[in-house]
Image (spheres, grey):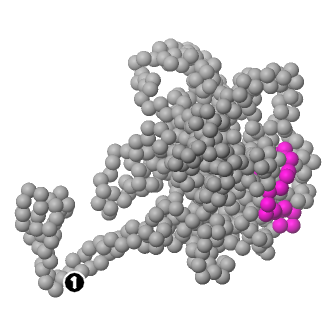
Amino acid sequence: MGGVNPAGRTSGHQAFRRTVLDVLPEAQQANTLLGLAALMRLASRDADERWHDASGQLLDAQTLVAQTRDHILNHTLIRRNEDPRFGAEGIPGNRRASLALETPLTFRLRRRELPDDLPPTWQVREIDRQQLEVTVPAGNMDVMLPETRPAQVKAAGQLPTGFEPSQLYRSVHHPRGLSMSIFAASDCLGDSGLNWDTLRDRLDPDSVGVYAGNSIGQLDEEGWGGLLQSFVSGKRATSKQMPLGYGQMPADFLNAYVIGSVGTTGAALGACASFLYNLRLGVNDIRSGRCRVVIVGTSDAPITPEIVEGFRSMGALADDDSLKALDALELLTDSDYQRACRPFARNCGFTIGEASQFIMLMDDALALETGAEILGSVPDVFVNADGWKRSISAPGIGNYVTLGKACALVRDMLGEKALRERTFVHAHGTSTPKNRTTESHVFDVVARAHGIEQWPVVAIKSCVGHSQGTAAGDQLTSALGSFAYGLLPGINTVDSIADDVHAERLRFFQQPVAFEADASFINAKGFGGNNATGVVLSPNATERLLRKRHGEAALDEWRTRREIVRTRANHYHQSADAGRFDVRYRFGEGVLEGPELEVAADSIHIPGYAQPVSLNVDNPFGRLDED
């Protein structure tokens, strides 16, 4: 797994550790804070393993942790939006106005600033080669007056302050979401401990898949946002904005610049369930035998004035006025913004976030052959729509079906006792009043159906916000952290659960709790009826299933091979914790256009790929005899 969100880097469980920081042993706390300090460019570690602060001063690790701890805690997770446009500076905009000119108006401007299509009453006089003088007669003139508008929503789950993925590789005007994708996919490869080129060489190139996208597209200035603003902002559209704005572009970037894949690819967009939609495609490809390795992910960077205003106008976001009313406050402090997202408590809307999450899936035989580290396994992902609805944003019934199927699968695979006592739910948990009642009712009735008495509920959005299509990726990688550390993150922004939450059979907790789980349910209750529930099994449960299928001898051989992989992964983690990231970006390398291929009737050999692409395809339709 790899990526980044407001809690930090995904690999090595850094982001997970940030969400349970206070209950970790002191040494793990210090290691987490040092890694975050390096990520945020507050510190660096040299080749002799000595730490330096941002000014270059040599410090011991303990002193550095003490100096940076408060800054790190206040500039990770949900907090006051640090984008200047959302602060006192205000959001730039324009206001339509009609000027009543009592006398002619004369002004000067550069020749290139003069509109091509002039009103017929304007008089233009040339002053020199660069400047013109324009006279507008008396009367009414329609204009756009520049202004700044105070942001009405100031809480956001931003990436840790100081971390800029575009600075880690040769980025040329890449939208933020795509820069995050490059980092996240590279982080995933590093975390795996596998050499990608070696792994690829043992496979048919067509047995590698990539499913990655996002829920909105790239709507910042470098993508479709700048393209759509170009006419009214007076800026020129660039040749990059149109292509880089597409929602499937994270997959395209991985194929073209990170792994050089020629295998299956695509992106499924399903609002908040987009990560799970892509995960389902990857799981199905592996289960069917079409792929042996699939990289799945999403990357969303929706913290822009336009997107925030769009959600605010829907009444979906926790804006400043609503937060003040919720707690009867006159002013909001930094600590109030840090508590903006309150799943299953008295709340007023979700808090927008940004994140990029990627995971590598393998079939079980290949995982054993390569000695891959098994963080967990995904047997299935279930998707169902809501049926008839009052409005596209209204709650519906599909989530009852997805969670019900997921529980039935775990019961069949692991048994009723495991389902009842050793599973937990990663809730969608958006922090809206509708979600707290509808999602809790889904959980409660499904728990009742299966005899679950106290089902633990995790709501990670209370820490990192709602990253739209990547939300379930935040949930899944957090669940993998829970398997590794035996801890469930608490909903630390709430004092009590709301009265209208169906909590009879659910267990909510404010602080992290110890819990040994066999499985987690990753739930998405998405806008428009895009419901999905993914099942992720713990490493322990996965190994028990592998032992049953492959035998103990095969697992012993896998454990031996895994030691080498673990050593490589640990080396990557140590480098990343020191702020040295191995970002993989191979622009223009190994480019092929067709004439270089060796094409035969049953295979295609591609230069640079060790194995040929097999053209022996399955034919389930039967065969007609030749005349």
Residue 384 x %, y %: 69, 53
For the residue pair 56 and 490, the one nearer the viewer reads as 56
Q: Left of 323 or right of it: where is 135? A: left
Q: Main secondary structure of the magenta part?
A: loop
For the residue pair 50 and 537, the one nearer the viewer reads as 50
Q: Secondary structure at mark 1?
A: strand
Rendered view: 341 above or below 263: below
When asked about the image quadrant of residue 569, the answer is top right
Residue occupying image coordinates x 60% and y 82%: 330
The answer to whether residue 220 shows anywhere in this view is yes
Tally of marks: 1
When asked about the image quadrant of residue 507, the answer is bottom right
Residue 523 x %, y %: 72, 54
The answer to whether residue 529 shows anywhere in this view is no
Residue 398 x %, y %: 71, 57
User: Dividing the image into 4 quarters, which one contains the C terminus?
Assistant: top right
Residue 51 x %, y %: 61, 42
Q: Is 517 a magenta residue? A: yes
For the residue pair 22 and 101, the one nearer the viewer reads as 22
Residue occupying image coordinates x 67% and y 28%: 568
- Residue type, label 1: Ala
Rendered view: 206 above or below 579: above
Q: Which residues are magenta?
A: 503-521
Q: Left of 382 or right of it: where is 577? A: left
Give the residue number, with chain letter if any, for mark 1: 100
Q: Is 548 a magenta residue? A: no
User: Dividing the image into 4 quarters, which one contains the N terminus?
Assistant: top right
Q: Which residue appears farthest toward the bottom when viewing the image?
A: 102
Residue occupying image coordinates x 73% and y 59%: 459
When asked about the image quadrant of residue 286, the answer is top right
For the residue pair 377 and 444, the one nearer the viewer reads as 377
Residue occupying image coordinates x 64% and y 33%: 572
